[in-house]
Image (cartoon, rainbow, N blue to C red):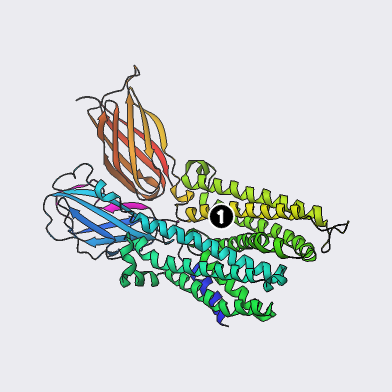
Amino acid sequence: MAVLAMVTTSIGLGLGVAPASAHALLTGSSPADGAALSTAPTRIVIDYSESVRVTRDSIRVLDSAGTRVDDGQARSGQKASQAMVALRPGLPTGTYVASWRVISADSHPISGAFAFGVGGPPEAGAARAEADTSGSRTVGFLFGVARFAGYAGVGVLLGACFFLLMLWPQGLRTGGASRLVAGAWGLSALAGLGQLLLQGPYVAGLGLSGLGRWSVLSATLEERFGHLLLIRLLALCLAVPLLRRMFRTGSLDVWRRFELAGLGLVVAVTLAAIGHGSAGDLVWLATASLTVHVLGMSVWIGGLVVIALFLVRRAAAVELAEVLPRWSRVAVGAVAVIVLSGLFQSWREIGTLRAVIDTGYGRLLLYKVWFVLGMIALGALAQRWVRRHYGGARSGPDATGAAPSVAALTGLRRGAASELVVGAVVLGLTATLVNMVPARTSYAPPFTGTAFAGPMTVKVRVAPTRIGAESLDVYTWAPNGKPQKLVQASAALSLPTADLGPFEVPLDLAAPGHARSDRVQAPLAGKWQLRLTLRINDFDQYVTTLFYTVR
């Protein structure tokens, strides 16, 4: 019953999240970036594309001397997708920089900074000094190592237990197999504990000194991320007596096998429910798909470890003839599960084919696919080896009655080891992908359009075309093909379908024939109308309109 309760709880935590895009994005702020205010604001409000977790220090506002001017009590706004902090009353004239760092729904930290001015525009580049709020690189590196170790440990632990219980029970009598499982258990536990301790400093942007702060750890323990890791560690601890009994007696009865399988499912769910699977649309299906993906990869990698280290070296010829054909069939099923669940997850996190090439996430996913195909190719060679030496029989040596030679077995072991090396690369790429913004969220190809304003040809570029901050570049050419100098330019944005706007967008004259702005804000998705007003002298002014889509 305890195992059933843990399975239910872990699945509930894995699925119990509100829909959100994996990784939040900044969609706007008040004051806006670059705003020139006539009176001092009383608070800072920041909007995001999804719900975020806000801590007391999530927003820091500094004056030009580096002194904090907020009350140090950042909190959620009227909506879960807002963060806000109160400012000291009566701020004097000057430049102010607001740096922020919050946690998105998929447990990843996001950060940034913007500047505003009181009594005039902010100083150019004022926010750059505070823009790098990514936190300690050492903590980030260690957190990535712990994540990779968790994938490797859980994969070997679950896969080795499956292989030894279901395919090669005789292997439970070997001391090396018990040490392998114990090592995988220890790696999984240490990785889980490491992630639990590092998550707080990682999301808060602290260094290693944050490891010793109870307030930092308690914040993690109060989160869903911490709950899932605690459940994983508890499941690993509950599995210890079952694993000890399994190796001591060389088997487990049916009930205890179900208990061990249930605990393994709990561990897999907690692994799948942390990351991109916990945010976005179809969360329940995504978590289920990732859980199946984890189990399939575990069976494949864990089985290869047992084959390479123990089966080929220690098993008798009769055992090889019985186990290898069965493993070959199981491996085919595991690969099918991995491919199908991977296709669904790729579709969910990428969205469009263009995003595969045009985003870092998509390109890295392509590398992972190539390495997985490499594993499949090596696995196909191993399957051919099994068919050649054991035919289609379920047991017994080949038709000649001769067992494979030592050289042939060495080749099989090397092939399994090669698969494992490629598999380690796949796990490393997976650990990296988990920490990246999915392509569906980050893909926002720039809009380029051409229009005519009186005698001028106008070319417009907006990037990126997603909710939040955008940059706008306007290029103008005279009829003779030369850049048309402007004396004044402005823009207005509106979203007719939502009855929003028009919002005035000031344009800076960057060069002859070029006006631009980095202060464009698109708070909603939809087809936006961009109205440009371009003055070329004291008497001639032209207006043109373009439309572009914000995703």
The reply, left or right, for residue 348 in relation to residue 495 is right
The reply, left or right, for residue 228 in relation to residue 496 is right
- The amino acid type, in three-letter code, at marker 1 is Ala
- Residue 309 visible in the displayed image: yes
Disc 1 is placed on an element classified as helix
Q: How dense is the environment of label 1, judged by Cα within 10 Å: few (below 14), some, or many (20 and up)? A: some
- The magenta region covers 21-40
When the figure is inspected, residue 236 is found, relative to residue 143, above or below; the finding is below
507 inside magenta stretch: no
The reply, left or right, for residue 161 in relation to residue 18 is right
In x, y percent, where is residue 477? 33, 23
Label the magenta part by its dominant secondary structure.
loop
- Residue at position x 75%, y 55% from top? 406
Q: Residue furthest top?
A: 480
Question: According to the image, label 1 marks what residue?
Answer: 424
In x, y percent, where is residue 441? 45, 50
When the figure is inspected, residue 466 is found, relative to residue 245, above or below; the finding is above
Q: Residue furthest front?
A: 406
